[in-house]
Amino acid sequence: MAFREYRIGCIMFGVALSASMFVTIFLPGIDISARSSTKIALEKQLTYGWESGFNYYDPFLQGKDKPIMVVLTKDPRTGAAMDKTDAYVFPAGTHFPDGLTHDNILGEKVQAASTTKGRIGEASEAAGGVFLVRVDADDTPYIEYATATRGWTTDAVLKAADQQFLAGGGKTMFIREGCWWCHTLLPEETQDWQTFGRPPMTGDFNGESPTTFGSDRKAPDLLHVGSRNSSREWMTMHFFNPRLVQPHSIMPRYDYLWGNKDKDGNKIDLHAWDKEYMAYAEGDSVYPPEVPVPADDSEARMLIDFVLNLK
């Protein structure tokens, strides 16, 4: 039997052309471990923290063992005004993402800058600390351990924060509630660019576990949804009852993530709320009932923080 072989790169494909011919083709492969982290990858690692799947530290997926992302407009140590800055607070004992604990995650240049300029080697999980994402003069992103470089303590940063986001715990909610069954976090390189934003790069995922790409598109891609829709009020209504904002939505309700109390400590009566909502849906009431604001420590607040952080 005649046999012809073509070798291109390192991945082999065999194709039968006829009863007497078979072609073997090798296509190029990618060494993902050799890819350097992008700035996005560093921000994601520090926002989401360590493993967000089933693990010993959070076996019931309750959003535990996660960092807190904060927004600062003044220096936590001196009180002086500063440019708006995102900081990532790891309370003592919170597990670090792989990029802070494994040398081969960040990439050679990013690792070197994070070690020499950012002093990440001085950080420890037991003590916790505050981190920033910086970019040097060569456009190399790196992680700065602000507790060592600026004297920022976790307590001082949390006290000085203008906003706090529990997006790390929210990613756990996103996984636990199966949001990735219908939504992707991976726009395709087609017309998706215009609607859903730029597709991610390979280096955007260094140190993220799991990636939650999603496997279906029953609903819009959410990778940049925080840029398209940054309204916390809209998201609150959407998660409590999607039909409040999209009458024909097939998305399930997530009102149970609110728990028993709202932000002000008032008891949430879902039965009474549903009764008022049905009166509105059937035209017996002009206005729908108000959606309770999630408590600061609720699972609903975590999930909303995560989605708003997707930019």
Image (spheres, rainbow, N blue to C red):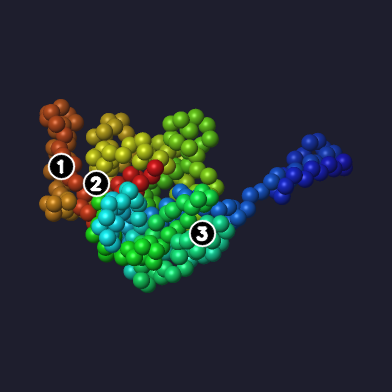
What quarter of the picture does the C terminus occupy? top left
The residue that disc 3 covers is: 113
What quarter of the picture does the N terminus occupy? top right
| Amino acid marked by disc 2 | Asp
Marks 1/2: CA distance?
Answer: 11 Å
Marks 2/3: CA distance?
Answer: 44 Å
| Amino acid marked by disc 3 | Ala
The residue that disc 2 covers is: 255
Contact? badges 1 and 2 (CB < 8 Å): yes
Q: Residue furthest right?
A: 1
| Sooner in the amino-acid sequence: mark 1 or mark 2 | 2
How packed mark 1 is, by other alpha carbons closer than 10 Å (few <14, some 14-19, many 20 or more), is some
Q: Nearer the viewer, mark 2 or mark 3?
A: 3
Q: Secondary structure at mark 3?
A: helix
Contact? badges 3 and 1 (CB < 8 Å): no
| Sooner in the amino-acid sequence: mark 3 or mark 1 | 3
Q: Secondary structure at mark 1?
A: helix
| Sooner in the amino-acid sequence: mark 2 or mark 3 | 3
Left-right relation of 300 to 93: left
Location of residue 65 in the rendering, given as x and y in whole percent from the top left corner: 35, 63
Location of residue 127 in the rendering, given as x and y in whole percent from the top left corner: 36, 71
How packed mark 3 is, by other alpha carbons closer than 10 Å (few <14, some 14-19, many 20 or more), is many
Using the image, determine if residue 230 lies above or below residue 35. above
The residue that disc 1 covers is: 273
